[in-house]
Image: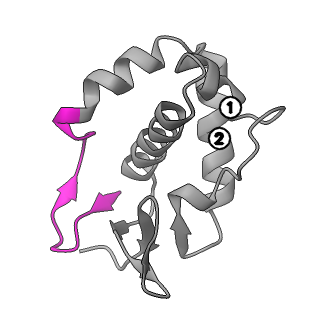
Amino acid sequence: MLFTIDGEQITDLPKNRKRDFTRWRTQLSDLEFLKIKNELINRIDGNNVHTSSWIPGTHWGGTVFEPLYHACNKNETHAAFFFGLILFHVMIEHNECWSFGKFDLNGKSIKGLTYFKIVCP
């Protein structure tokens, strides 16, 4: 389950991003999508904090995340954004409670969202 910092539950992707998600999602097979979701769940479980841009690493070739690059017509920026939307989707569906925010590290803005486990409201 995903909540805003203010405790409001989020049950769907942001309306202004659903179109991109749907378009890119149609370029993945159901199996590819399931493998990506399962990989994310495996990486999330057991830890309390995750930053989206740090999860997949910088080289996606030969990983479960490579199909995202192809689904986005080999556009790295779109693929990274699609990855973030899938992670957001996974967090919405997760059985534990999470929140998220944009944060800085050493005075520099962190690329992507940082998710952190919370006590369920």
Assign the C terminus to one quadrant of the image: bottom left
In the figure, is residue 91 to the left or right of 37?
left
Identify which amino acid the numbered label 1 is placed on: Lys
Task: Single out the residue that lies furthest toward the front.
Answer: 108
How crowded is the residue under tag 2: few (<14 C-alpha within 10 Å), some, or many (20+)? some
Residue 78 position within the rendered picture, expressed as x and y whole percent measured from the top left:
47, 32
Asked if 3 appears above or below 59 in the picture, the reply is: below
Determine whether the residue tagged by mark 2 lies in a helix, strand or loop. Answer: helix
Q: In front here: 21 or 77?
A: 77
Residue located beneath label 2 in the image: 38
What residue is rendered at 35% in x and 67% in y? 100
Q: Which mark is residue 35?
A: 1
Question: Would you identify the image quadrant in which residue 76 lies?
Answer: top right
Give the magenta range.
1-16
The total number of labels drawn is 2
Identify which amino acid the numbered label 2 is placed on: Asn
What residue is rendered at 74% in x and 38% in y? 60
Residue 46 position within the rendered picture, expressed as x and y whole percent measured from the top left:
65, 70
What residue is rendered at 54% in x and 76% in y? 48
Q: Are marks 1 and 2 in contact (CB under 8 Å)?
A: yes
Assign the N terminus to one quadrant of the image: bottom left
Task: Single out the residue that lies furthest toward the bottom.
Answer: 106
